[in-house]
Amino acid sequence: MKFLTKNLLAPKFLLFLAIVYTLLITIGSFISPSALPKVGYSVSDKLIHLVAYFVFVLIWFIWMYYHFKKKKFRIVLFATSCIAIIYGIIIEILQDSLTKTREGDFLDILANVAGVLIAIIILVVLRPKLFALKNRN
């Protein structure tokens, strides 16, 4: 288990994962909805936004928290959360102005923020474990 944790927390792997995930969100935000794969059941696009930004914050937070070892938990959490919210707002504005098949939606922004807030709550609850991992590596 220690080997797995150490490899999953490797800075290069986490950065790669964060960048790829961000690119996937960006691409998914600009391609036509008809080009997206269909699933056999209905999923609210607001739920997709919530989950996407929840994961976005988790991945970027973990990378930043372990990469910038001298930065405090709350500073990294604040920075990561602000970046995610600003990124989501920019994506919505660009969807409205750059595409014909997508439009910016204030409710999408609210769903993004909800995902960020849930990530914040979970990370605060997990803070002691994250701190222990950070100091062990």
Image (cartoon, rainbow, N blue to C red):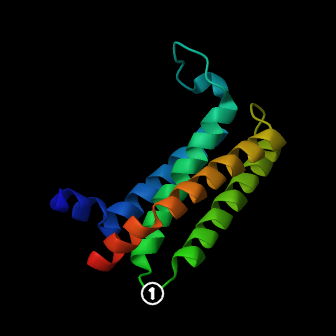
| Residue drawn at point x = 48 percent, y = 50 percent | 21
User: Which of the 4 image quarters holds residue 67?
Assistant: bottom left
Q: Residue furthest bottom?
A: 70
| Residue drawn at point x = 59 percent, y = 25 percent | 35
Residue 128 appears anywhere in the view: yes
- Return the residue nearer the eye: 87 or 41: 41
| Quarter placement of the C terminus | bottom left
Q: Residue furthest top?
A: 40
Q: Is residue 74 above or below residue 92?
A: below
Is 68 displayed left or right of 134 in the figure?
right
Q: Is residue 35 above or below residue 114?
A: above
Return the x and y of residue 90 as percentages of the image width and height.
74, 56
Disc 1 element: loop
| Residue drawn at point x = 23 percent, y = 65 percent | 6
| Residue drawn at point x = 61 percent, y = 35 percent | 48
Return the x and y of residue 34 as percentages of the image width and height.
63, 22
User: Which of the 4 image quarters holds residue 74?
Assistant: bottom right
